[in-house]
Amino acid sequence: MKLSSIAAETRRKKILETGIQLLRKTGPDGIGIQEIADASGIPKGSFYNYFPSKDHFLLEALEIYTNAAIQWNESVLEEGGRGPSALRFLYEKK
């Protein structure tokens, strides 16, 4: 992978991570591309170099968030067992 490709992928991940943090605070209707761009330190027009639209960004952010939730749930099942012990583990993990 070329250095410019690595830099672009790194920037794209940063935009996603930053956008996900904003989404947690405001939800999808409370956030615009300008806010994502500002928080990511890029011009608004550059956002479109990484995502064709806000909807595409939201879909990818949702996929990342969902995968993280699935991994967390799987770790609870692995560490805490099932049934009441899983609930106890979940309560204590909070």
Image: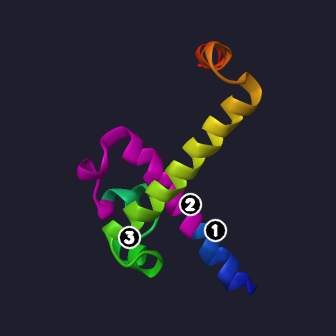
In this rendering, does residue 42 appear at all? yes
Identify the residue at horizontal 72%, vertical 24% (top origin).
Answer: 81
Q: Is residue 54 above or below residue 35?
A: below
Point 32% across, 67% down: residue = 55
Q: Which residue is mark 2?
A: 14
Image side of residue 7 versus residue 25, left or right: right
Start-end of magenta stretch? 12-34
Of mark 2 and mark 3, the one earlier in the sequence is 2
Query: Which residue is at the front of the view, 23 or 34?
Result: 23
Residue 10 has which mark? Answer: 1
Helix, strand or loop for disc 3: helix
Disc 1 versus disc 2: distance between alpha carbons?
6 Å
- Which badge, 1 or 3, is on the more N-terminal residue? 1
Q: Is residue 26 magenta?
A: yes
Q: Are marks 1 and 2 in contact (CB under 8 Å)?
A: yes
Give yes or no for residue 33 being in the magenta stretch. yes
Callout 1: SS: helix
Circle number at residue 56: 3
Neighbor class of circle 1 (other Cα within 10 Å; few <14, some 14-19, many 20+) is: few
Residue 80 rendering spot, x and y as whole percentages: 72, 23
Give how far across and how far down residue 9 sits, in percent.
Answer: 62, 73
Per the picture, the main secondary structure of the magenta-coloured stretch is helix
From the image, which quarter does the C terminus lie in? top right
Residue 25, quarter of picture: top left
Please state which of residues 43 and 73 is positioned toward the viewer in this rendering. 73
Q: Amino acid at mark 3?
A: His
User: What amino acid does circle 2 point to?
Assistant: Lys
Report how far apart the C-alphas of labels 2 and 3 lie in the structure: 16 Å
Q: Nearer the viewer, residue 50 or 4?
A: 50
Rendered location of residue 71, percent (x, y): 64, 44
